[in-house]
Image (cartoon, rainbow, N blue to C red):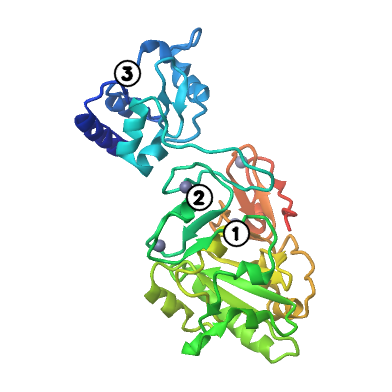
């Protein structure tokens, strides 16, 4: 990445012939790389921090420019004021244009202040006018090969090969109708006829589930077979339960392979991006929604794993399950440092002396050199 930056920088200089810009790239963890990467320095006064010891300087520069991650590129005006702190993102957006604008003392990104009820899309830039963050309605293309974002002004000026879709605002609540507005039909299981999406909640359906998963995610196979078995079972009861699959597969053929054994319908490949963005969930998640579109639980997978058919039957009736107990709770993203079980299920014991160290209830009994604390399960639903 940093090498690329220098490459682009040199290219841009070659054609512009402007020597007004200086590129400095620092590396937090490796002073030798940092020396190697520093090609041109700005006026020393911009790097001088009075009263600081030399070893603190890098850290203080990080703080001065509010740097949280690398690579990070801050473009300064001759006065030392910041022209843009999104240098990397501006170069990634349009390198030539970014360098040209900087040499004229302008930044590529711009934005406006939000009006009442307008959403601010942090870190998202309009591909066309470079408004960043996008304020107001955000549009995009759900096609896997496309990575475009448009603000509402650019929408009308832009022609695109695929259908343009409107993003849903995270955490805002929508009806099921609205959530699936860009997905008018679903692919039926077992190569059946397409299904009109709204028929899924037409007849007195209490709750539905959206299953986000992907074939490449190895634990997904086993869970999918279990869910399929329970799903078939619950269809024979008085209250059938509906599930819709949203794929994070890499291509359409693995999507088709993965859903071949699924007895529930799927959102067409390339049509799930809006839902994935809205729910902001992990690759392997089962979200249960009420018929009004309210989230019943985001931990559907955990409930299915520990409660089995009871979970599906309860949701189908429109009832809630009792909260997951300490012994049932699945700690997504945590593994046991003793037996390396991942993810950790059940009681989790944390060692604050070691820091990033957790043990499952079995390993906790074997003892640890420091005192351990039982981590309470989060109450986030
Ligand atoms: Zn725009
Ligand atoms: Zn597209
Ligand atoms: Zn363990
Ligand atoms: Zn410890």
Residue under label 3: 41
Under circle 1, the secondary element is loop
The answer to whether 261 appears left or right of 32 in the picture is right
The answer to whether 317 appears left or right of 170 in the picture is right
Q: CA distance from mark 1 to mark 3?
A: 44 Å
Which tag, 1 or 3, sits closer to the chain's start? 3
Mark 1 CB within 8 Å of ligand 2:
no
Which tag, 2 or 1, sits closer to the chain's start? 2
Q: CA distance from mark 2 to mark 1?
A: 17 Å
Most foreground residue, 291 or 139? 139
Q: Position of residue 345 (x, y in %)?
A: 64, 61
For the N terminus, give its image quadrant: top left
Mark 2 CB within 8 Å of ligand 1:
yes
Under circle 3, the secondary element is loop
Q: Of discs 3 and 2, which sits in the foreground?
A: 2
Q: Position of residue 51 (x, y in %)?
A: 51, 7
Q: Which mark is residue 153?
A: 2
For the C terminus, give its image quadrant: bottom right
The answer to whether 130 appears left or right of 41 in the picture is right
Q: Residue at x 47, y 35 (%)?
A: 69
Q: Position of residue 338 (x, y in %)?
A: 56, 53
Residue under label 1: 168
Q: Of discs 2 and 1, which sits in the foreground?
A: 2
Is residue 5 visible to us here?
yes
Compared with 176, 239 (above or below) is below
Q: Position of residue 288 (x, y in %)?
A: 68, 70
Which tag, 3 or 2, sits closer to the chain's start? 3
Ligand 3's quadrant: bottom right
């Amino acid at each position: 990445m940093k090498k690329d930056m220098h490459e682009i920088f040199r290219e841009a200089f070659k054609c512009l012939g402007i020597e007004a810009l200086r590129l400095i790239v620092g590396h937090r963890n490796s002073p030798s790389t940092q020396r190697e990467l520093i090609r041109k320095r700005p006026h020393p006064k911009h790097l001088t921090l009075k009263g600081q010891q030399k070893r603190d300087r890098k850290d203080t520069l990080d703080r001065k420019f509010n740097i949280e991650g690398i690579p990070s590129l801050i473009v300064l005006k001759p006065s030392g004021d910041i022209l843009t702190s999104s240098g990397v993102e501006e170069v990634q957006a349009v390198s030539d244009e970014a360098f040209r604008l900087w040499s004229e003392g302008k930044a590529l990104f711009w934005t406006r202040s939000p009006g009442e009820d307008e959403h601010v899309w942090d870190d998202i830039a309009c591909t066309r006018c470079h408004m960043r963050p996008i304020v107001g309605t955000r549009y995009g293309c759900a096609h896997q090969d496309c990575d475009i974002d448009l603000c509402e002004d650019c929408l009308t000026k832009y022609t695109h090969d695929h259908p343009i879709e409107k993003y849903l605002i995270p955490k805002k609540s929508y009806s099921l109708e609205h959530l699936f507005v860009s997905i008018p039909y679903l692919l039926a299981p077992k190569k059946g006829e397409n299904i009109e999406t709204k028929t899924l909640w037409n007849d007195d359906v209490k709750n539905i589930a959206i299953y986000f998963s992907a074939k490449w995610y190895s634990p997904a196979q086993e869970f999918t077979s279990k869910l399929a078995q329970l799903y078939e079972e619950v269809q024979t009861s008085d209250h059938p339960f509906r599930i819709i699959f949203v794929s994070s597969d890499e291509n359409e053929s693995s999507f088709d392979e993965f859903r071949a054994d699924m007895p529930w319908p799927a959102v067409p490949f390339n049509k799930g991006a809006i839902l994935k963005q809205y729910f902001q969930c992990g690759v392997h998640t089962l979200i249960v929604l009420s018929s009004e579109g309210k989230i019943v639980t985001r931990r559907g997978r955990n409930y299915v794993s520990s409660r089995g058919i009871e979970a599906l039957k309860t949701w189908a009736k429109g009832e809630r399950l009792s909260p997951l107990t300490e012994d049932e709770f699945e700690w997504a993203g945590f593994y046991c440092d003793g037996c390396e079980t991942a993810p950790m299920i059940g009681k989790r014991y944390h060692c604050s002396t070691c820091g990033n160290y957790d043990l499952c209830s079995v390993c906790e009994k074997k003892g640890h050199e420091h005192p351990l604390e039982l981590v309470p399960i989060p109450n986030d639903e």
